[in-house]
Image: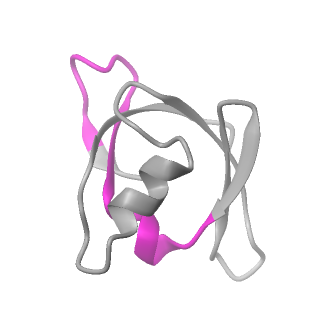
Amino acid sequence: MGAVVTVVEVLAGPHGQGRRLEDLGIVAGTEILVERRAPLGDPTVYEVRRARLAVRRGDAQFVRVAVGDENTGPYVAL
């Protein structure tokens, strides 16, 4: 927890999950702070543009992020 990542890409998802995440401010170039996980591991609370969002693992899998420098990766799912 406490890691800062940068969004590289938001995938569409079969039920429009990507669009919903973009509507919440999770778009390419956005920095996200991983704040904490729920006691059973899902959902995870993220700070996005000074707002806290709880995102389920099933939805977070559609967000590709860079750990460290956005240009060097490595790239992982949120």
Q: Nearer the viewer, residue 25 or 68?
A: 25
Of residues 19 and 53, the one nearer the viewer is 19
Q: Is residue 49 left or right of residue 58?
A: right
Task: State yes or no: residue 47 in magenta.
Answer: no
Report the residue at 75% width, 41% height from top. 51
Q: Is residue 10 above or below residue 62?
A: above
Total marks shown come to: 0
Tell me if 50 is positioned left or right of 64 in this view: right
Residue occupying image coordinates x 75% and y 48%: 52
Using the rendered view, name the quadrant where residue 60 is placed. Answer: bottom left
Left of 18 or right of it: where is 43?
A: right
Q: In this view, does 69 lie to the left or right of 36?
A: left
Residue 42's x, y, as percent?
63, 76
Choose top left, top right, bottom left or bottom right for residue 6.
top left
What span is in magenta? Answer: 55-75
Query: Residue at 49% of width from left, 72% of height from top?
Result: 57
- Where residue 24 appears, as percent x and y from the top left, is 56, 50
- As for residue 64 lying within the magenta part, the answer is yes
Quarter-wise, where is residue 12 in the image? Answer: bottom left
Q: Reply above or below: 74 against 37.
A: above
Coloration of the structure image: one colour
Q: Where is residue 74 in the image (x, y as percent from the top left)?
A: 25, 34
